[in-house]
């Protein structure tokens, strides 16, 4: 049975050239596990490219803007450099373990070119460059699945409902006995 599963992204930035940018940055994601086999390593994207499973539904990550590095901005899957082929969500036995993506505004090389951008890379690493190279840093990435709500449990019937059910069963029993007696 397919399920839409949500999770949280937590990035703990520790290595920075300016300590005021250290901290925890968060986001969320969701996916549909319909096409996952949940065996071994699997890869999921939005459109399910070659060798990848379809099913990534959303990616949102709140991080600093590139120009000032002050205002938090929410980046989505559409901000990814090669959207819709990426972002990529990696799984191990059905459990999401990491994202692979790059946000490169203006297509100027991003982190690799020392320009504005951020990326999630293997194994669980987050790297960023802000203000065209003046602020740089690295952190660790943790993905957590949000607990799905428990299945609804039927409420206990009220005493009145129980009485009605008992009387109904008793009435059916009396009707059957009277029908047998008349035959």
Image (cartoon, rainbow, N blue to C red):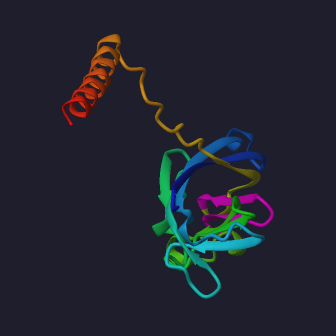
> On the picture, is 36 further left or further right than 152?
right
Q: Nearer the viewer, residue 183 or 47?
A: 183
Residue 145 sits above or below residue 156 on the image: below
The answer to whether residue 62 shows anywhere in this view is no
The outermost residue toward the top is 159
In front here: 38 or 178?
178
**Measured from the top left, where is residue 99 in percent x and y?**
66, 64
Identity of the residue furthest to the bottom in this view:
50
Q: Is residue 174 left or right of residue 36?
A: left
Q: Is residue 172 visible?
A: yes
The picture places residue 13, in percent across and down from the top left corner, at 73, 46
Q: Quadrant of the C terminus?
A: top left
Height in image: 105 above or below 50? above
The span picked out in magenta is 114-131
Q: Write the residue at 50% across / 76% down.
A: 83
Q: Position of residue 84 (x, y in %)?
A: 49, 77
- In the figure, 85 relative to 104: above or below? below
Q: Is residue 182 left or right of residue 102?
A: left
Query: Which SS type dominates the magenta stretch?
Result: strand
Q: To which quarter of the image does residue 81 belong? A: bottom right
State the image quarter where residue 18 is shown.
top right
User: Which one is in front, 173 or 4?
Assistant: 173
Q: Looking at the picture, how far across and down is residue 121, in whole percent?
A: 73, 66
């Amino acid at each position: 049975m397919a399920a839409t599963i949500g999770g949280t992204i937590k990035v703990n930035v520790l290595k920075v050239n300016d300590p005021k940018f250290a901290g925890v940055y968060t986001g969320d994601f969701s996916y549909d596990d319909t096409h996952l086999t949940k065996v071994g390593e699997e890869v999921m994207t939005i459109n399910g490219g070659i060798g990848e499973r379809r099913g990534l539904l959303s990616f949102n990550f709140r991080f600093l803007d590139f120009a000032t590095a002050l205002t938090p901005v929410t980046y989505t899957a559409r901000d990814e450099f090669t959207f819709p082929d990426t972002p990529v969500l990696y799984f191990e036995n059905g459990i999401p373990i990491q994202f692979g993506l790059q946000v490169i505004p203006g297509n100027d090389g991003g982190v690799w070119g020392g320009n504005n951008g951020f990326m999630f890379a293997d194994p669980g690493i987050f790297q960023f460059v802000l203000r065209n190279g003046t602020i740089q840093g690295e952190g660790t990435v943790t993905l957590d699945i949000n607990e799905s709500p428990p299945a609804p449990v039927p409420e206990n019937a009220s005493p009145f409902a129980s009485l009605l059910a008992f009387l109904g069963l008793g009435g059916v029993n009396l009707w059957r006995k009277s029908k047998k007696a008349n035959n």
